[in-house]
Amino acid sequence: MVNYIWGGMILLGLFMSAVNGSLDKINQSIFNGAKTGVTISFTMISFLVLWMGLMKIAEDAGLLAAFAKLMKPVVRFLFPEVPPNHPALGYILSNMSANLLGLGNAATPMGLKAMKELQEINANKKVASRSMITFLVLNTSGLTFIPTTIIGYRIAAGSNNPVEIVGATLLATITSTSVAIFLDRIFHRFSRSGEGR
Amino acid sequence: MFEVLAIISTWSIPVAIAGILTTGLWKKVPIYETFIDGAKDGFDTAISIIPHLVGMLVAVEIFRDSGALGTLIGIISPLLVFFHIPAEVVPLALLRPISGAGSTAVMTHIFTQYGPDSFLGKLASIMQGSTDTTLYVLTVYFGSVGIRQYRHALAVGLMSDVVGIITSVTIAHALFG
C-alpha cells in the first residue's frame, strides 16, 4: 500500500506540475526534499546515540525486567489466555516497556520474539489468535510515556521547548489506547472464528 | 491539570536518565562502557533512516509544490472542518497509519514551515507521538510468524488511529490553542 501512496504522490505531483507549467519549481523541490532528508538524519544522530546508550545501561541493570514485573497485573488483564509465567509474557512486557519509553526501534526485536512465543501456543498457525491481536492493537495504537523520537525531531528542528508536548501526547495516547483495547474486546466478543480465541 | 502535564513534560527525561544511571551504578554495571556499546546502535539507526526520509521528503515536496496536496485537501475539507483538523496536518493524519517515515517527513516539513513551537508544530508532534504505523506493525509482526488472517486487528488498528488523531486535535486545542 505504501508503494501506491509513494508512487501516487510523485506521479500525481509531476503530472499536475506539468499541466500548470511549474516544472522548473518542481526540480528545485526534488533536490530540497533529498537534502532535507539527509540533514535531519544527521541532526538526529546525536539524540539517537545518547538514548540508545542509556537504554543499554537500563537493560544490563535489569531495569527493563523490573519494569516488566511491575506491569504484570496489567498484562494478566490484557492477555487472560496466555498461561502465567509463559515466556511470551516476558517478551510482551519488554516490548511494551520499550514502547512506553518511545523507543520504537528497540521495541521491535522484543515484539517479534513475543509473536514467536504467541505462535507456539496458537491453535491455528495461519489465523491470528486473540492474544496476538490484542498485542498488535497495543503496538499500533502507540502507547507511549516519553515520545523520545518526536523529542529528537523537535530538537533537530530547533525547538525552544522540545519536551513541551510530552504531557499532551501522554493524554492522547492513553485515550486512543483505551479505545483500542475496548474495541478489541468488543470485536472479540462478536467474532465468529472459533480458533485461537 | 495543565500544570501537572507541564511538570511531567519537564521532569520525565531528567528523571529517567538519573534513574537509569543510578540503577546501573547500584547493580555494578560498567555504565560508561555499556553506554558506548549501546550508543553505537544509535548511529546505525540514524543512518538507516536516511533512505526513508529522502524518499518520502522528495515525494512530499513534489506532491505539495505541484498543488496536488491543495487539491486533495480541498476535496476532503468538509470532513476536516467537522473535526476541527487544520488542513496543514491532514497529510500527516492520512499517512500516519501507512508509513512512519512518511508521516515523520510531513511532521518535519511542518516544523521547517511553521516552527516546532507553533500550534501546528505541537499538534503534529502530539499526533505523531500518540499513534503508530498500523500497517507496518501488522505486516512485520504477523509476517514474521506466517499469520495470514489478521481477523479484526487491522480494523481495530485503523479505528484507534482515527480516535488518536481526533483526540490529538482536541487536546492540542485545549492546551495550546
Image (cartoon, helix red, strand yellow):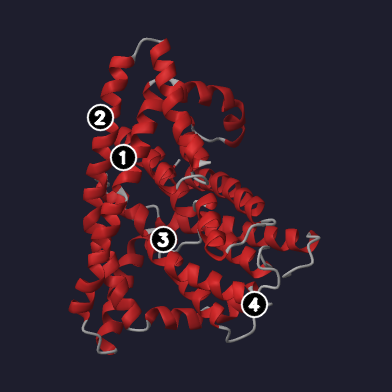
The residue that label 1 is drawn on is: B54
In front: mark 3 or mark 1?
Answer: 1
Label 4 to label 1, Cα distance in Å? 41 Å
Label 2 to label 3, Cα distance in Å? 29 Å
Side of A92 where B156 appears, left or right: right
Label 2 to label 4, Cα distance in Å? 51 Å
Side of A39 where A197 appears, left or right: right
Please check whether the numbered discs 2 and 4 fall on a single chain: yes
Per the rendering, the mark at residue A121 is 4
Residue located at (26% from left, 48% from top)? A41
Q: Position of residue A91 (x, y in %)?
A: 50, 76
In front: mark 2 or mark 3?
Answer: 2
**Of pointers 2 and 3, the one earlier in the residue sequence:** 2
Label 3 chain ID: A
In front: mark 2 or mark 4?
Answer: 4
Callout 4, which amino acid? Ile
Callout 1, which amino acid? Val
Callout 2, which amino acid? Phe
Q: Position of residue A112 (x, y in %)?
A: 49, 68
Please check whether the numbered discs 4 and 3 fall on a single chain: yes
Please check whether the numbered discs 2 and 3 fall on a single chain: yes
Label 2 to label 1, Cα distance in Å? 10 Å
Q: Position of residue A97 (x, y in %)?
A: 45, 71
Callout 3, which amino acid? Gly
Per the rendering, the mark at residue A31 is 2
